[in-house]
Image (cartoon, grey):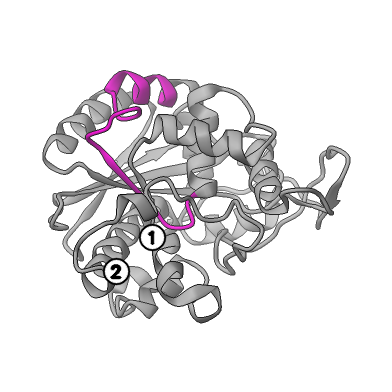
Amino acid sequence: MSGCSVRQVWRGDLDVAMEDVRALTEKYPYVSLNVLWAGFVARPICCHEYAYASVKDAVDLCDPLQIGLSFADSHGRKPNYSVQFNLYFPRNCLVQETMDTLISQGYDAAKAALHGIEANDFAEAMLTSELVTNEDIRWITYHGSYDLGFVYRALTTSQLPETRDEYIRNITEYFPYLYDVKTMLCSKFGHRDLPGGLRSACDFLGLGSLPIVVNPDASSRAGINSLLVSACFFNALGQFFDNKIDDAKFKGQLYGVYDDDPLDDDLSPNGSIGVSAKLPPGMLRLKPGTYSPDAKKATG
């Protein structure tokens, strides 16, 4: 795994990269997904289906920065690279504190504003590549309700559905064979004894000694994290599930949309961040701030 590199994809090479991704899935149909986004803009104050409302608010109000995909066969064998799609940076981004942190860690906001992939172009490439609605592909996430939400919003060019059940139904139409590693681990250990986020899960599974776990450069964060999701999945499958996945128990069981699913402490890049925009009724305003890529140039 440490020998894998991250292939950076920008607007100009999207079509070629997506053709290569489609070819990869012929041999490596286990596709692990991770999305880098700028953190929580707001939280619902109190509502029915609070956990799903938190997902919906985050996805509807934020924009994804990177979408990382890693590939494996049924034995966990991988090609020598993962793929990261670098998306267009919105100039009205509402999370200054997180963006400052990401830029200090290597995220290039200025390049993303100039050469980032438009969400509509990414969606068209995904749909024409037949990666979605494909029953031959196994999608792997870790606490994937947010990651899949951002991809769903791009694919449909619409906000998330109003109810949790409709969201899950729509997600499983696009991703028919979907497994969430955190759901699998919680079935074995429960919420109380299981660490929160992806990096904590790597330590829990004995993957914490890998150098890429410690402090991945933000320029490749989603690509690297998708590798970690894949590593966690196959490691957990071998340690606790006899290298067999129980479809009846785990297929389509997405973590993070039910009210008894605790929020991960390291889900977002820098925790809950604030907003300066007018929010819909019933949402908690957090610390204000806006960010423009013109205000600070990226480093690294």
- Residue at 35% x, 26% y is 126
Q: Which amino acid does label 1 sit on?
A: Val
- Whether tag 1 and tag 2 are in contact, CB under 8 A, the answer is yes
Q: Give the range drawn in magenta.
A: 122-144
Q: Residues within 10 Å of mark 2 (few under 14, many from 20)?
A: some
Residue 256's spot in the image, x, y percent? Answer: 57, 55
Q: How crowded is mark 1: few (under 14 residues within 10 Å), some or many (20 or more)?
A: many
Front residue of 2/115: it is: 2
- Residue at 39% x, 63% y is 184
> As displayed, is residue 138 above or below residue 104?
above
Residue 283's spot in the image, x, y percent? Answer: 83, 47
- Residue at 20% x, 49% y is 81
Front residue of 128/250: it is: 250
Q: Is residue 295 left or right of residue 106?
A: right
Q: Distance between the residues labelled 1 and 2?
A: 8 Å
Residue 56's spot in the image, x, y percent? Answer: 66, 41
Q: Is residue 123 magenta?
A: yes
Q: What residue type is labelled 2?
A: Ala
| Numbered disc 2: secondary structure | helix
Task: Give the labeled residue for mark 2.
Answer: 236
Which residue occupies the extreme right position in the image? Answer: 281
Q: Does the magenta stretch include residue 295?
A: no
Residue 96 makes an appearance in the image: yes
